[in-house]
Amino acid sequence: MKMIFRWHGPKDPISLQYIKQIPVLYGIVSSLYDMPLGETWPMARIQNLRSAAAAHDLKMDVVDSFRVHEEIKLGKPGREALIPQYIETLKNLAASGIKIVCYNFMPVFDWTRTHMEYQLPDGSNTLAFEAALVDKLDVSNGVIPLPGIGTKYPPEKLQALLEEYKGVSTEQMWSNLEYFLGKLVPVAEQLGLKLALHADDPPRSVFGLPRIIKNIEDHRRVLDIINSPANGLTLCSGTIGSDLNNDVPAFINEFAARQRVHYVHLRNVKVAENGDFYECAHPTECGSLDMAEIMRALHDAHFSGYARPDHGRMIWGETGVPGYGLYDRALGIMYLQGLWEGIAKQKNKALLPSLNAVA
Ligand code: DNO
């Protein structure tokens, strides 16, 4: 397992020097966050990010947030002109040394939260989701008065998009994803790149939008669209685990064993019966997920791909990009590495008596 850390590029308040000080870190994961949606990513800019990382002895093999244009997700004719640009981007990524491309297929919004600074009793704050707040909101005017629901679209555009999606069924979304993968997977395969789809976060419908990557059957269906290692997954424990019906280790047992999990996002969530949740500290006892079992499942599957601590709380007075502070994510890494080492050592120890018996 190669542990990496999300860095938002030169504008990130966290320096690469600080990131490098986190023990046993393999590298960073980043993106060209300011690129207009659908435009080809210039090779020089990807290389600049990789060189900045390399200057601190950090690798950058993964890009996270390779955003898919709404024309593609909506299956509109405009997608035909966009696909060649995506293919060019894949070529530039591969030529720059990138190996994994994490993307999602969520309509309009990326991850959705209702609170960006949800106060925890210990004085820290975190991202949270309150289902009723989302469900009762009327967003038909394109205005979303909730801090955690970011969108890159102005109200008129948002209003039009929401209107357009009203005519798109979940089956149409699946066929739009099939079209996208049909065009990109063969190219990725040739280039030695692996695409890694991230589930819809949270794994439920929001604002009536057709969200399709929510449970184990959906993940299976994605992999069946094209049976190729280039058509893989980003397995996000906190996303799929925020639906208590999803058994995260079961996802790993099935998909990592098939060598289709290329990248994992590791975080814990505290989930209430009604589906509300907040993002807690990484340890098992802080939340609803058994992080040790998740790490064990990865270890059992001989997972050698990339992992990052996902969102963290804001602790020790830190301010910055919500979910992406330094301190809690660094604590998360230390905890996850500790679990990993413990599991590996325990397995070796368990092997010893039988080896002795052979000797
Ligand atoms: C939230 C984050 C996301 C994720 C993108 C992948 O859960 O992990 O920013 O990286 O949705 O496309």
Image (cartoon, grey):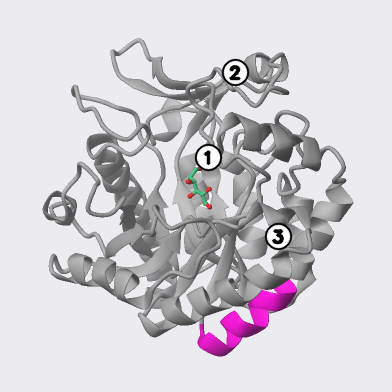
The disc label shown at residue 238, or none: 1
The quadrant the N terminus occupies is bottom left
Q: Are marks 1 and 2 in contact (CB under 8 Å)?
A: no
Q: Are marks 2 and 3 in contact (CB under 8 Å)?
A: no
For label 1, being within 8 Å of ligand 1 is answered yes
The disc label shown at residue 72, or none: 3
Answer above or below: position of 13 versus 287.
Answer: below
Image location of residue 16, percent across then percent down: 17, 55
- Using residue 40 as the reference point, say whether residue 21 is left or right of it: left
Q: Quadrant of residue 349?
A: bottom left
- Using residue 57 as the reference point, say whether residue 231 is left or right of it: right
Q: Give the spatial CA distance, label 3 vs label 1.
A: 27 Å
Image location of residue 57, percent across then percent down: 15, 69
Q: Residue furthest top?
A: 121
Q: Is residue 243 visible?
A: no
First in residue order: circle 2 vs circle 3: 3
First in residue order: circle 1 vs circle 2: 2
Q: Callout 2: 10 Å neighbours few (<14), some, many (20+)?
A: some
Amino acid on which the number 3 mark rests in the picture? Ile
Question: Helix or strand or loop: what does disc 2 sit on?
Answer: loop
Q: Is residue 229 visible?
A: yes
Residue named by callout 2: 130
Question: Helix or strand or loop: what does disc 1 sit on?
Answer: helix
Amino acid on which the number 2 mark rests in the picture? Glu
Image location of residue 279, percent across then percent down: 46, 29
Residue drawn at (25%, 70%), measured in percent from left and top? 48
Q: Which residues are magenta?
A: 181-192
The disc label shown at residue 76, or none: none
Q: Residue furthest front?
A: 156
